Image (cartoon, rainbow, N blue to C red):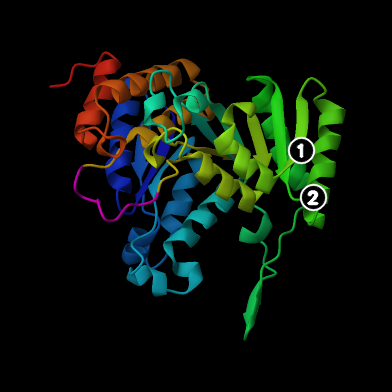
Amino acid sequence: MPKIVTLPGDGIGPEVTAAAVEVLREVAPDLTFEEHAIGGMAYDAHGDPFPQITRDALADADAVLLGTVGGPQNSPWNSLPRPMRPESGLLALRKALGCYANLRPVRVQPGLEHLSPLKPELARGVDILIVRELLGGVYFDQDRKIDGDTAYNTMRYTTPEVERVARMAFWAAEQRKGRVTSVDKANVLEVSELWRRDVQALRDREYRNIHLNHEYVDSVAMLIVSDPSRYDVIVTENLFGDILSDLAAVIPGSLGLMPSASLGDGAGLFEPIHGSAPDIAGKGIANPAAAIMSAAMLLRHGLGRSDAANQIERAVALALREEPTRDLGGKADTRTFTNAVLEAMGTPVG
């Protein structure tokens, strides 16, 4: 039986993760679940945001379902040395799993265009997949320092790192519309020159059926909200991908609608992209849609069960129409929305 390690984390993480697990148990009753700590709660319990007991549990995991990490700005966790902060546990988790490619779908469901802050004619039909390199660049390079009044971080990439994430983007595009936009800043950054060269070379060598174009990150930041339908698959490096994917996340209407999958050498990591929202933690009003759709991505990309994933996604779309959550202008709380998803899947709710 496939083993799923759940890492509920901090803030609203336990609430939305519980909703996702409930849906997974219904659609895939053969799955087994093992829960462990990460982030601030792990530090409180074990003195480490990514403790050894959690690391050990990943060894035989088939997939990992993550909630959220982090606390409020005034959290005592933020005064800890950087390696002990909750976010460092997340970075260490990604590295331990070898997750070098983050897939973030940005999709406006038919009939839900009114939820988007964009005009309906711009939001209608938007279906973008952002593929973000996840283990390189300024977030991971060790050539970094604060020295008095001077500080620096280094953005560094190698050809193998660029090729493996570009290959993931081309693979995804083959199953979609066959278009990839590679995003860089090659007019001013040497590392982006390498990025552009290597992405183009891989396309010319192995993926001639894919239409590839290159765009600067500042241009994409404008066009992704003014003409989002121009994009199919976007591939970019870690920092640019972090910013662009959060910018694009507003298009469907809420961060509570944004799932993600991080894939690479081992078990995949699946998580909503929203934060821990400590201001509403424990109130039972968090939107679990992103966590539930992350569970769908777990089934599709982690276990190869596309039919079950499609079933969940259809149910979420229906629940969003009938029982929108408070962040979407509705009244549904976490329990009400989860029940609506289960009912849409044909599950009686008592």
Task: Give amino acid for label 1.
Answer: His
Within-10-Å neighbours for mark 1: few <14, some 14–19, many 20+: some
Residue 122 vs residue 76, the one in the foreground: 122
Identify the image quadrant of the N terminus: top left
In the rendered image, the vertical position of residue 312 relative to residue 141, given as above or below: above
Farthest residue, direction left: 350
Which image quarter holds the C terminus? top left
Bin the neighbour count of mark 2 within 10 Å (Cα to Cα): few under 14, some 14-19, many 20 and up. some
Q: Nearer the viewer, residue 40 or 217?
A: 217
Quadrant of the image occupied by residue 346: top left
Q: What residue appears at the point 65 percent right and 35 percent down from the top-left corner? A: 234
- Is 132 left, or right, of 330 in this rendering? right
Question: Percent from the top left, x then y, of residue 7?
Answer: 38, 47
Say which element carries label 1.
Answer: strand
Q: Position of residue 320 (x, y in %)?
A: 31, 25
Are the residues tagged 2 and 1 within 8 Å (C-beta)? yes
Instruction: Name the mark on residue 186.
Output: 2
Residue 90's place in the image compared with 104, above or below, is: below
Residue 5 relative to residue 283: left or right:
right
From what the image shows, is residue 216 above or below residue 320?
Answer: below
Q: Is residue 226 left or right of residue 155?
A: left
Q: Position of residue 77 (x, y in %)?
A: 37, 69
Identify which amino acid the numbered label 2 is placed on: Ala
According to the picture, the residue beneath numbered tag 1 turns out to be 214
Residue 43 position in % (x across, y down): 37, 64
Which residues are the magenta region? 275-284
Tell me the residue at 47%/31% (across/down): 298
Q: Earlier in the sequence, mark 2 or mark 1?
A: 2
